[in-house]
Amino acid sequence: MKITVWNENRHEKTNPVVAEIYPEGIHGTIAAFLEDAGHQVQTATLDEPEHGLTNTVLQETDVLVWWGHVAHDEVDDTAVEKVVQRVHDGMGLIVLHSGHFSKVFKKLMGTSCDLKWREADEKERVWVVDPTHPITEGLGEYIELEKEEMYGEHFDIPTPDELVFVSWFAGGEVFRSGATFKRGRGKIFYFRPGHETYPTYHQKDIQQVIKNAANWAANNNTPKPVRGNAEPLEDLSR
Amino acid sequence: MKITVWNENRHEKTNPVVAEIYPEGIHGTIAAFLEDAGHQVQTATLDEPEHGLTNTVLQETDVLVWWGHVAHDEVDDTAVEKVVQRVHDGMGLIVLHSGHFSKVFKKLMGTSCDLKWREADEKERVWVVDPTHPITEGLGEYIELEKEEMYGEHFDIPTPDELVFVSWFAGGEVFRSGATFKRGRGKIFYFRPGHETYPTYHQKDIQQVIKNAANWAANNNTPKPVRGNAEPLEDLSR
Amino acid sequence: MKITVWNENRHEKTNPVVAEIYPEGIHGTIAAFLEDAGHQVQTATLDEPEHGLTNTVLQETDVLVWWGHVAHDEVDDTAVEKVVQRVHDGMGLIVLHSGHFSKVFKKLMGTSCDLKWREADEKERVWVVDPTHPITEGLGEYIELEKEEMYGEHFDIPTPDELVFVSWFAGGEVFRSGATFKRGRGKIFYFRPGHETYPTYHQKDIQQVIKNAANWAANNNTPKPVRGNAEPLEDLSR
Amino acid sequence: MKITVWNENRHEKTNPVVAEIYPEGIHGTIAAFLEDAGHQVQTATLDEPEHGLTNTVLQETDVLVWWGHVAHDEVDDTAVEKVVQRVHDGMGLIVLHSGHFSKVFKKLMGTSCDLKWREADEKERVWVVDPTHPITEGLGEYIELEKEEMYGEHFDIPTPDELVFVSWFAGGEVFRSGATFKRGRGKIFYFRPGHETYPTYHQKDIQQVIKNAANWAANNNTPKPVRGNAEPLEDLSR
C-alpha cells in the first residue's frame, strides 16, 4: 500500500521542545513506523511546492495521513479541493489531532469541527468502545497517555459512522477520540491524540492504531458508482 | 413554529406546464399546506434581494424548506454561508428533490450529492423502512406516485443518521428517498419526490411527510455547546 | 400520554438508606414528577400479581419505565415476552440504570449488556454529545452527579441508533450513558444514572431527561408494517 | 481462516428441483467456492448429532455461514445458545436468505425479523448503496438475478450498523438486502438472495459477496473487554 504522510511541519522548526521529541518531524516519525509495517511511504509538508501534494502524488496515494495545527489557513484551496476529490474517489484519509480544524476535514464533515481544549499535562485514557473494529486489533481495553492536551465535548462533527474510541481526561472531560466517516468511495478516520509537545507518536499502541487505520482505510477495488442520466431496465410503455 | 419556504421559482416563470400545476409557485403550494397546519409561514425566492434570506428572516426561521434546480449556481455564496451557519446554530432544514444539488446541501454533506436520474413518467413507490420515525406519522406502508422523475443509486451522500424511506421505480432502480442528518445543533431532512412537471406537492401523503418533517426538524431548546479553552474540573496537580 | 413506571421495589424494603431516600419507592418518585408534567401515570412492581403488568395495563401503556436490580431472575418469562411484544408493537421503553441487566433489555438488545462497575461514591459528569436530540432539551452541556456508582466501558450493547450522553467518572472510566434503540415500531432509551443509595431521581436535570425521554419514546400513529405473503404490483408475466 | 457452512439440508432431500440445482446441498456449493478462495472449510447440517455444531467445531470456527428455512424450530435451543455465545466472543456470522427467521438471527437481533415475500420468478436487482464497503469489492453497481423469490419491506430488523445493498423487485417492492450488525465482539452480515429453487449460489457475483463477507467478518485479535467489578484509577479519597 502507498501511504503519504502530510505534516504542516512548523512547530518542529520553531519550538525546541517539539524538535527534540520529533527530530525528523512528526511526519518522519509516522512515516518510519508505517514503513516498518511494510508499506511504501512518502512524506509531504506545507512549505514544499504545492504542499507536496501534486496530482501525481495524490493519484498514487492509497491512504493520506494529515497533521496540521497553526497554519491551516496557509493550505491552498486548490490543494484542499484536490484532496477532497481524491477522498471521494476512494483514497483513505487519517486525520490526526489538531487536524480536526484543517480545511480538508471541515470540508468533508460539513460542520465547524470545533471542540473544547486545555493544555495542562493531563492524563488521558483512550477507551475502546467498539471491540469488533479492525482499528482496535492488538490493543488492550484502553490506551493510557501519561500527559496530553485535553480535547472535550461537544466535538462538532456529524454523527460518526462508527465510534471506536472515547477518551477520559483527568480534568473532567470526555471526547469521541476515534471515529470513522464515509464520503463517496473514501474512508476517513479521525484520531485525537498527538499534541506536538508530547511523545505520543513514539508510543507503541498509538502507532498500532495508525497502522490498523491505514489497513482499514485503503480501498481495494470497491464499485465505481455510475451517475447521471440513465437508461431504464426495459420498455416503460408497457 | 416559524417556517420559511425557499424556492428558486424559475420553472414556474418559463414552463407553462409547471405554471399550470403550481400557479402560486412550488413555494406557494408548500406554504399553503404548512399554514393550514397552524404554522407561521413565509416564502423567499431566488430573485428577491438577498434571495429573500436576510439576516432577520434567517434569525426568525425555525425550519427552512429548500427547493432549487436549474439555478443552483446563482445562489450567492454569502447567503449559502449564512444558511449553513443557521443550521449549525439549530435551524431545521428540509431539502426537497433537486435541492440535493444545492450549494447549501452539498456544503452540509461534504460529498458530491450526485445521483442517477431519468425523466420517463415512471411509477414510484416510496416505502417506509423506519416505522418508528415521527416523519412517517399518519402514513401507510408506502406512498405511491403515479408518475415521477426517477432518482437512482448510488446517491452520493454520507451515511444518513436515519434512513426513513426507500423508493422503488418501475425502470429498475432504488433510491434512499428520505434521510435525516445532524449538523451542529441543526436537523436536516432530505426528501426525494417533487419534480416540477408533476403535481407531487398537491398529493396529501406527500404534504403529510413535509408537515411531519417540519415538526421533527424544529429545535426546541437543546443545549448550546460550549467550546474553546476550558477550565479543568479541579486542581490537576493533585 | 399514559406512562407505567415499573420498579422491582426490593431495596426500598430491605435497605433503610434506600427507604429514606425513596420513601414512596423509586417508582413513586419517578411517577410523581411525570404526573406533574401532565401525564397519566401508574406504577407496577415485581411483587404484584403478574408483576403489575397485566394485558390491560400493557395495552394501555404508551411508555413503560423500567428499574430493576437484584431480582431480574424473578421476573416471569411470560411477562418479559409480553413487554417485548408491546415494544415491537410500538410501546416506548425507558430502561434505567441497573435495568441494563433486565431480561427485557437483554432480549431486545441481543447482547449480554454486561459492563464494568464500582461503588465508590464517585463524581459523575454526564456529557451531552448530541445537542440536536429532544432528550437533551432544557439541559446544560453536562449533568453533574456528586456521588454515583461507576459504570464503565466496555458496555456490551449493539451500536446505539443515537448516542446522546457519555459519562465521565473520577476513577478513570467513561460510559455511553444515554443511548437510543429502535425495535419493531418501538423506541427504547437507556439512561445510566440512578443507583438506589443516591438521591439521583430527585435531581431536577435527571428528571428533565426522563420527562424528555417519555415524550420522545411515545409512538404517535406511525405506519403499521404489513408482512407475509404479498401480491405483486401488476402482472409479472409481461 | 476456518469457515463452517451450516445448512438445514432438507429441501435438497425432498424437492427434486433443489436436488438438481444443488446435488451436494446448498452447503456443498458454498463450501466449494470458499475452499477455492483458500479457506479451511467444513460443513454441518441439521440432522447430524448436535446439528454438527459441537463445542470443538464452534471453538475452531472463525466464520459461520447459516442457511435454514423449513426447520428453524428443530434447531435445539442449546445449540442456538452456543452459537450466539460464540458470536458474542468474536466469531463472524453470515446469515443467508431465509435464515432471517432462524432462532440464532432472531436472538441476536431482538426483533421479529419478519418481512414480506412472494414466489413469482421475479427479476431482482441488488444495488450497492455503500461503495466503500469491503463486502462490495470486485462488484459492479448492482447484481442482477433473473429469477428470485421476492422479499419486501418492512423488514423487521434493528437499524443496521451498515446498509450495503438494497434490492429492487419487478413486482413493486424494495428490500434492505445486505446489512451488517455488531454483537459483542462478533460481526454479522445478513445477505438476502438464495431461494432454494434458483441457482443463485452458483452465480459468480453472489459468490464474490459471500467470500468478501467472510473476510470482513473474521475477527483478527481485537480487544477482549474486561467487565465486572473494577478498581479505580487511583485513590478516590483525594
Image: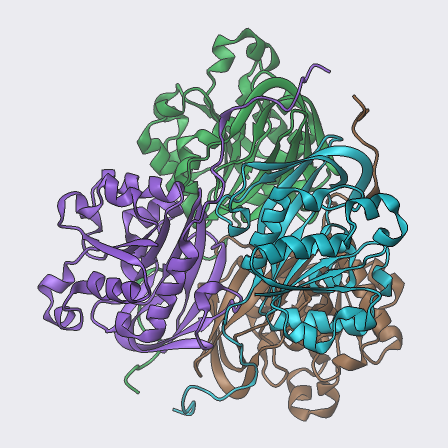
Chain colours: A purple, B green, C brown, D cyan
* Above or below C81: residue C67: below
Give whichever of B79, B104 is nearer the camera.
Answer: B104
**Residue B39 in the image: x percent, y percent?**
59, 35
Report whether residue B170 is seen: yes
Give whichever of A215, C202 is nearer the camera.
Answer: A215
Report whether residue A6 is seen: no
Quadrant in the picture for residue A81: top left
Residue at image coords 54%, 30%: B96
Give whichever of D194, C167 is nearer the camera.
Answer: D194
Residue at image coords 72%, 60%: D105
**Residue B73 in the image: x percent, y percent?**
36, 24
Give whichever of B166, B13 is nearer the camera.
Answer: B166
Residue at image coords 52%, 86%: D230
**Residue B176 in the image: x percent, y percent?**
59, 38
* Above or below B74: residue D52: below
Residue at image coords 73%, 37%: B139
